[in-house]
Amino acid sequence: MMHKLIAPLALLLPVLSYSQQTEEPGLDERINAWFEPITAVWESIVFWQVPGTGIPLVVIILVLGAAFFTLYFGFVNIRRFPLAINVVRGKYDAVEGPEGHGVEKAEVNIVDGDLADTIRDESKHGEVSHFQALATAVSGTVGLGNIAGVALAIAIGGPGATFWMIVCGLLSMSTKFVECTLGVKYRDVDEKGTVYGGPMYYLSRGLTERGFTGLGKVLAVLFSVLCVGASFGGGNAVQSNQAAEQLAAMMGLQGGSTGFIIGVVLAILVGIVIIGGIKRIAAVTEKIVPFMAVIYALACFAVIFANFSYVDDAFVLIFEGAFTPEAGLGGLFGVLIVGFRRAVFSNEAGAGSAAIAHSAVKTKYPASEGIVALLEPFIDTVVICTMTALVIIFYNSGGIFEYGGDGAGNVIVNGESLGGVTLTSLAFESVLPWFPYVLTLAVVLFAVSTMISWSYYGLQSWKFLFGRSKTADLTYKLLFIAFVIIGASASMGAVFAFSDAMVLALVFPNMLGLMFLFPKVREELAKYLEAIRALKT
């Protein structure tokens, strides 16, 4: 597969060489010059800081909301972890049977015109299995945020940022459980059996059910607009940017249009895939996600075992750095914010985006998918992000670079400014000299799988706004493909800033809605647990 991706780039080497020789700004520089001012304005709005604290309001909302859900649901992130594993394994699939083992079926939503005689038995609806829904959602979260994003966090916040990423990941499991349960409960199923779900549906329908019709519609529209933007940013531009950077570094490509041309190749590849739908995406990601996760995890373990004697020292650095950060890293809150910002970008809990993929699951018990979804932040942030952080900390055990760097995510290594996926690649190369080639393949797979999953998220939001016509479908996909090219062409700092702001902006409408609707989640959880108890008797 790798040679098929690289071959078109090799044919473009003469073009890149010519671009390098010209004095005029290349396409990459022109696109970046247009993109950076837009990013700066949007970032300043989303990351508005509460006066006197230096902490962005969005971070406060995320932390307090996740902590509340964790306490309210009795530490569901810990107590229901074994249940989540068993549900994914299919141990309780029998509760989805037509009879329901005498347990009352999940309520059929009749708000906004959904009638019981058209929706019928919810167990017959949905398009993918629990495992496929998890794989699709994980492919949207386990991506270059785990490779490049962690490097960015360590470069800016030092080892201590890892601690706060882990804390955020654990708390985020509860938030993910809430939003994905609601995603299934309030999903829409059309006459063809196609499922439409996500925050835009539970915000509009759920709040209408609670008597807040106007607020629900406003929040649903706001979420949809922001989700389309997030699909262009975090789900697209970051992925193509870091994939292009790694491909260019590995192949020695240079020139003012390098990113643009690699972006065109990636755009063609992504464009071919997203013509499918959630069934096609689920089929692809079901195979890609386990493969790329295993390869990446094995490499992480190889580096960790090669530095086994330093593991305890690394965790000491992580813990101490979380509370006594090194000078110049912005103090305690600075490191906390960096850690939470990167963790949320990585697992998207609180943003609500993954609930769109989980809504397509085949189940009549919404809480069953909420339980499955809480595995996402654990896999993505607690496990994979921590392993990546350890690899980078091991690499810098000899003081190769200074934590903090330029404050924008780049550090100086041997006189060269590096960051993101390039820094992670160097860290792996220090133990596994051949791994940058494998990492390049992994980066491309992570990028493509994340982009096709996020294209589904964005398309669902787009259809909520503009209808479910073929014209609306094609318009969105063309815009999405254009951002593949923009992301590959722009600078890493601008792309990450824009993407962070777009993804985290989703928190405002989504978390507000969750605070109105969380009692419904308790009801659904009780129904599902009752069904499991009945199955055992």
Image (spheres, helix red, strand yellow):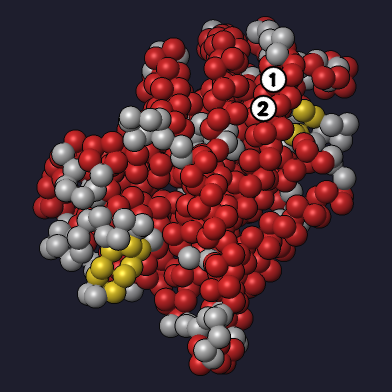
Image location of residue 233, percent across then percent down = 57, 52
Residue 492, by quadrant, is: bottom left
Q: Can residue 142 be seen in this view?
A: yes
For image coordinates 41% across by 68% down, the residue present is 438
Q: In this view, does 187 lie above or below 139?
A: above
Location of mark 2 (residue) = 219
Quadrant for the N terminus in the image:
bottom right
What residue lies at 54% left-to-right and 81% top-to-bottom? Answer: 25
Horizontal side, residue 59 vs residue 434: left or right: right
Residues at marks 1 and 2, CA–CA distance in whole angstroms: 6 Å
Residue sticking out furthest to the front: 51
Reading the image, the residue beneath label 1 is: 215
Whole-percent x, y for residue 127 in the image: 72, 37
**Mark 1: amino acid:** Leu
Dot label at residue 61: none
411 relative to 119 in the view: left or right: left
For residue 251, above or below residue 22 = above
What is the total number of numbered labels drawn onto the structure image?
2
Amino acid beneath label 2? Leu
- Which quadrant, please, contains the C terminus? top right
Left or right relative to 11: residue 317 = left
- Residue at (53, 49) in percent of width and height: 41
- Asked if the residue at tag 2 contacts the one at tag 1, i.e. Cβ–Cβ closer than 8 Å, the answer is yes
